[in-house]
Image (spheres, rainbow, N blue to C red):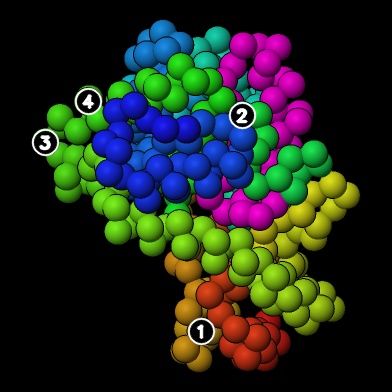
């Protein structure tokens, strides 16, 4: 969708927006960062929907920091919900338990690239007049029943790719509001330059991200092979639990391979690092961070997961490196 507020010279930005529009079937508005996309879209939605400051948005206990910070920056109050122990996704059961009279929306983050149960969530939210947002950054490519690559009918689907951020929205009026917010309002704040809330994505970066989007989609086959290698290697190890497999109608993106251990992760993490195998830092839930000053939620599944999980490299490595990871885990697990 061409944004009437975008200068005609921004051909690569427009091309990037078209690529995401084609992927999702929605109107795509590109920002200079994930933070920017979150903020201009959430503020635009607030204005369109007439949302009051302090309204609650339910998020997963495994949601990333940027999501929570930008909800708060947009005047919304995040409320954490627990996740399913097998898929690690927010569920209808947890939404029902968490919703209050102040709830206006659900923000779904598809943890590690496995799509959440969107058909159930969307049907439940529709009957209660709640908006549904989701971050599908790790869902390229995925298939969830009849939907793929983030083309499910949520009100706003966010992507971050490289240094850019994209908000894909169903409503043309909301798309126009996003474009206006991107250009006029957000960028008047003095702190935005240092926090990554700049206005337009520079043209060279837009071209780079167009190419990166294609390479991300093309890399799925390699990630899928490595995922299979890990599954076969770890399936028979006692006390080590691989992540979900694909189930009927659902294909996950193979972006992140998290194993769960009967004992804590520290021994394995320390020794893998000694062997030169780079692993992400331990997940710290946002409600455990200093930035969170509200009451700590009771999320037993999230707590168990962050204590006992370790994420193995999968995106960005080759088959030789994957074999080295497997050998190291077998020796140490």
Q: Dot 3: few (<14), some (14–19), or many (≥20) neighbours within 10 Å?
A: few
- Tag on residue 154? 2
Of label 3 and label 2, which has the lower sequence position? 2
Q: Where the C terminus falls, by quadrant?
A: bottom right
* Mark sitting earlier along the chain (3/4): 4
Give residue 53's quadrant in the image. Answer: top left
- Between circles 4 and 2, the one closer to the viewer is 4
- 56 versus 205 height, above or below: above
Please state if 257 lies on the left or on the right of 58 as rendered. Answer: right
Q: Which residues are magenta?
A: 113-142
Q: Which residue is mark 1?
A: 277
Q: Name which residue lies at 22% across and 25% down.
A: 184
Q: Residue furthest left?
A: 190
Q: Looking at the image, is mark 1 or mark 3 earlier in the sequence?
A: 3
- Marks 2/1: CA–CA distance: 38 Å
Judging depth in this view, the residue of 280 and 295 nearest the camera is 280
Q: Examine the rendering and report whether any part of residue 301 can be seen.
A: no
The residue labelled by disc 3 is: 190
> Callout 2 environment at 10 Å: few (<14), some (14 to 19), or many (20+)?
many
Residue situated in front as seen by the camera: 255 or 163: 163
Q: Residues within 10 Å of mark 1 (few under 14, many from 20)?
A: some
């Amino acid at each position: 969708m061409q944004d009437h507020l975008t200068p005609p010279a921004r051909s690569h930005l427009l091309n990037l927006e078209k690529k995401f529009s084609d992927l999702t079937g929605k109107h795509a508005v590109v920002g200079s960062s994930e933070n920017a996309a979150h903020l201009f879209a959430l503020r635009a939605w607030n204005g369109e929907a007439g949302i009051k400051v302090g309204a609650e948005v339910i998020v997963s206990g495994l949601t990333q920091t940027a999501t929570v910070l930008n909800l708060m920056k947009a005047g919304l109050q995040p409320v954490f919900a627990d996740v399913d122990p097998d898929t690690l996704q927010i569920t209808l059961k947890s939404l029902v338990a968490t919703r209050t009279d102040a709830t206006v929306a659900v923000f779904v983050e598809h943890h590690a690239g496995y799509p959440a149960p969107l058909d159930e969530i969307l049907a439940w939210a529709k009957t209660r007049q709640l908006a549904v947002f989701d971050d599908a950054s790790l869902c390229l490519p995925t298939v969830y029943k009849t939907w793929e690559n983030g083309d499910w009918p949520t009100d706003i689907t966010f992507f971050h790719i490289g240094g850019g951020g994209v908000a894909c929205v169903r409503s043309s009026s909301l798309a126009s509001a996003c474009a206006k917010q991107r250009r006029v309002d957000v960028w008047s704040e003095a702190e935005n330059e240092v926090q990554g809330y700049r206005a337009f994505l520079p043209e060279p970066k837009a071209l780079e991200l167009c190419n990166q989007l294609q390479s991300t989609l093309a890399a799925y086959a390699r990630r899928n092979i490595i995922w299979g290698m890990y599954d076969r290697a770890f399936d028979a190890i006692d006390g080590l639990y691989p992540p979900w497999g694909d189930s009927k109608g659902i294909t996950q993106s193979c972006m992140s391979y998290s194993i769960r251990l009967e004992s804590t992760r520290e021994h394995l993490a320390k020794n893998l690092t000694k062997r030169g195998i780079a692993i992400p830092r331990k997940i710290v839930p946002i409600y455990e961070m200093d930035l969170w000053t509200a009451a700590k939620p009771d999320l037993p599944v999230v707590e168990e997961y962050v204590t006992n999980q370790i994420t193995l490299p999968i995106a960005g490595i080759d088959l030789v490196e994957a074999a080295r990871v497997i050998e190291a885990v077998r020796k140490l697990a």
